[in-house]
Image (cartoon, helix red, strand yellow):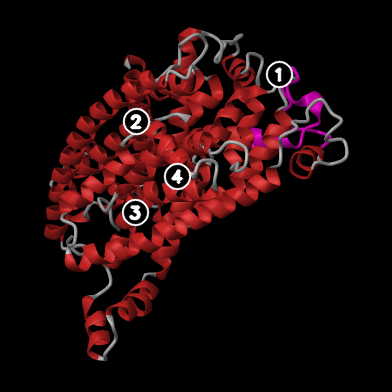
Amino acid sequence: MMRKSQRRRMSAIVRYLVLTVWAVIAFFPIYWMISTSFKVDTQWFAWPPVYFPHPLTLSNYLNVWFGAEEYAATQYAISSQKPLISLLNSTIIATASTFLSVLFGSLMAYGVSRYRILSEARMFQLLMLRMIPPIVVVAPLSLYYSALGLLDSMTGLILIYFLTTLPYAVWMTKSFIDEVPREIEQAAEILGATRWRTIFEIVLPLIRSGLVATFLFILILTWSEYLLALIITKTQVTTLPIELSKYQGTTEGRVYGRQAALSVGITIPLIIVGLMIRKHLARGFSFGMVRR
Amino acid sequence: MVRSLVFATGSTLGCFLVGFALAYLMHRPFRGQPFYYTIFILPMLTVPVVVAYTAEMLLYQSGPINDLISHIAGIEFKPMWLTNPDIALLTVMLLEIWNWVPFSFIILLAGLSAIPKEPIEAAEILGASKWRVFWEVQLPLLRPVIFLALVLRFLEAMAEFPKTWALLQGGPGTATETLPVYIFLTTWQYFQISKGAAMSYIVMLLMIVIVLLAIRLLRREKRSLDTMYAVAGQGPAG
């Protein structure tokens, strides 16, 4: 008896040990990013590395986000930077495309769930939209876009994000709609509600939390998208990931503190959103294969 | 091409192994579980470009990662993660693994927790050891989810672009020119648009074949999963 409980304690200790090691691995880069964003410039790449920045400074944030007075004068300035505008762009683009995606996705999912407008095979083929590497379609896409005048415009990005995230939206909302009992809809119909009213006033409100989860899930995808934004946008419209990548070409040396300050700004919204929907993440990723 | 396959296979397996280990350790509730869960999903919520730049901050030769490893191992440990062509691909692979372990972890954890309790209990009553329960009950029941985690991860890894590009632009030399990076370079850097388009076409055909196979596999697995849930009497069918 004694031995068994001892073994159980051992295995618990091992488990905590392993989990903690990975937790450290998972968290350290994020910690480093945050801590670097508060470092003064002599500590950005000091030797030995500074693990706990001592004089904490906000100057990186002020410089990057608000262009404080020393901004233009320092060697670290990057002339084309306007992160606040990018923030606005990113917000508009991500929100609009996600909204469209969830709206049409849920309507489609309703059709699939109730009337099987798409067979199971079609549903899986829908996933192909997501599985083909975007790199192979960006060239033709940018040709189309230049013909349509959508290059370097928000509309263009919104449309393509809408299209590429639609499969996720359909699959995810379908799994929620499947759980709504049909009887409720039948009751509404008997009371004389039209189909649209049934959908918008009965079904969608019932899966509200599911819709929110889907919305946030897709928001994560569109917020961090890089490749399409890199190619479709040029100068008029930039999103935050592109803004960050402008540091790549600077020759003045490594401006880690500024980079980190910008990175933190980009990442924090995502982390908040992600933690809000952490219980639903599995559903979004697994296309109805895993349910709880 | 080969590089892409190596990259995708390596990172898929890496993600899977780590994700699976973590999921297995966490599939029964214990104290502190929500805390670990929260920490573990953080890497996934980091924007890929941010990952690339943070990696740059961490991995330069006298950077914090090498410093930490040297301290822990007690020896001078200074590989040039980013500039040595021999290990640059490995570096990107490790980053990809760091970034996407949460994905495998989440799916596998959900899958493990969704396995009906009865077969496990039955096996335990029949005197099976933990080891045998794992290999002969849990693993087979988990097969669909495992396939899902592997297939999706592999496809995503084949398409991985932002980290590789933002960190190394295919360099040093051509060490990290995976397919997407190569196509991107050809089309937008050297402006050989027709060559890029031709390559895109080939890659697309190839990927379509892989994707169709994957979809067929997933459909078959989904069906067996539906059967399992139906037998266990859990959840709605469909």
- The residue lying at 50 percent from left, 28 percent from top is B163
Q: Quick check: B130 left or right of A93?
A: left
Label 1 CA crowd tier, 10 Å (few <14, some 14–19, many 20+): few
**In terms of secondary structure, where does tag 2 sit?**
helix
* Amino acid type of the residue tagged 4 in the rendering: Leu
Residue B235: % across, % down: 22, 63
Q: Quick check: B1 left or right of B237?
A: right
Quadrant in which the C terminus of chain A appears = bottom left
Residue identified by numbered label 4: A148
Q: Chain of mark 3?
A: A
Labels 3 & 4 near each other (Cβ < 8 A): no
Residue B233: % across, % down: 16, 63
| CA–CA distance in space, label 4 to label 2 | 46 Å
Residue B25 visible in the current orientation: no
On screen, B108 above or below B7? below
**In terms of secondary structure, where does tag 3 sit?**
helix
Which is closer to the viewer, label 1 or label 4? Answer: 4
Would you say the magenta stretch is mainly helix, strand or loop? loop
* Amino acid type of the residue tagged 3 in the rendering: Arg
As for residue A47 lying within the magenta part, the answer is yes
Earlier along the polypeptide chain: callout 1 or callout 3?
A: 1
Which is closer to the viewer, label 1 or label 3? Answer: 1
- The residue lying at 24 percent from left, 85 percent from top is A189
Q: Bounds of the magenta span?
A: A31-56
Q: Which mark is residue B17?
A: 2
Q: Which mark is residue A251?
A: 1
On the same chain, marks 2 and 1? The answer is no
Q: Chain of mark 2?
A: B
Label 3 CA crowd tier, 10 Å (few <14, some 14–19, many 20+): many
Which is closer to the viewer, label 4 or label 2? Answer: 4
Q: Quick check: B136 left or right of A243?
A: left
